Image: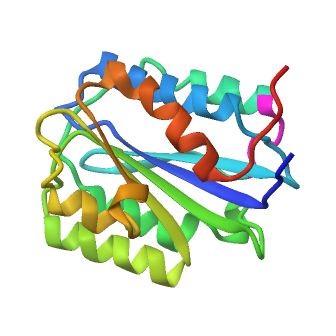
Amino acid sequence: MNVVFTDVVYIMDRSGSVKEADFDESVDFVYNVTEYLAIGTAEMQVSIVVFSSSYSEKFDLNDYTSKSDLLTAIRNLRGTSTSGKTYTYDAIDYVKNNSFTSAKGGRSGANRTVVVLTDGLSNDVNRTMAAADDLRTAAAAEVFAIGIGSTVSKSNEELRGIANDPDSYFVHYIDTFVYLCNLIPALVPKLGTLCILS
């Protein structure tokens, strides 16, 4: 088993263009990815931030240190209402300044990974890309971007600006939320802390 010390934060779009059923698909995706990962204080920790016109951290990195408790907390995000605009940059700034701090359960020496899930352009593309650049440099984080739907195409400069390079590794596209499950085999090994499933 390959064990890596990793803190992972998911930034999940719940703006008005995302149907509530689609947000549930995003939750199921994070849940299913987490099932394949080794979770614990000496392995991987997970936090989730949701955003639209405002942002909300649903739980800190060290709030749930057992896999069963973490999976329950993720599942409980199903049914989240969706509304508002797409202020992606505010959520990214919040993660940069707060999510990896010791007060939020961030661990010294841990790898830092951020996964952004969104179905469209933010309300300020340049500000979003600048915020992501700051996140990568100031927080030393690896950033993945997952774009869902026709609004987010492979020519989407913003999504490529959010993610680390190369785009072929850090940027993923999927046609609809129901197909997010198809990305699980691609994302799980990239997050780095795998568990052995019986």
Any part of residue 1 in sight: yes
Q: Residue at x 15, y 55 (%)?
A: 156
Verify whether residue 138 appears in magenta. no
Residue 149 placement: quadrant: top left
Q: Is residue 106 left or right of residue 23?
A: right
* Front residue (pair 129, 188): 188
Residue 168 placement: quadrant: bottom left
* Front residue (pair 66, 56): 66
Q: Position of residue 106 (x, y in %)?
A: 71, 65
Verify whether residue 64 appears in magenta. yes
Q: Residue at x 46, y 76 (%)?
A: 136
Q: Position of residue 14 (x, y in %)?
A: 31, 36
Residue 73 placement: quadrant: top right
Q: Is residue 24 left or right of residue 34?
A: left
For the magenta stretch, what is the residue range?
62-67
Any part of residue 80 in sight: no
Q: Position of residue 55 (x, y in %)?
A: 38, 50
Q: Residue at x 78, y 59 (%)?
A: 4
Q: Residue at x 50, y 83 (%)?
A: 138
- Give the position of the N terminus as an image quadrant: top right
* Front residue (pair 5, 172): 172
Q: Is residue 17 left or right of residue 183?
A: left
Q: Is residue 58 above or below residue 137?
A: above
- Give the position of the C terminus as an image quadrant: top right
Type of secondary structure dominating the magenta stretch = loop
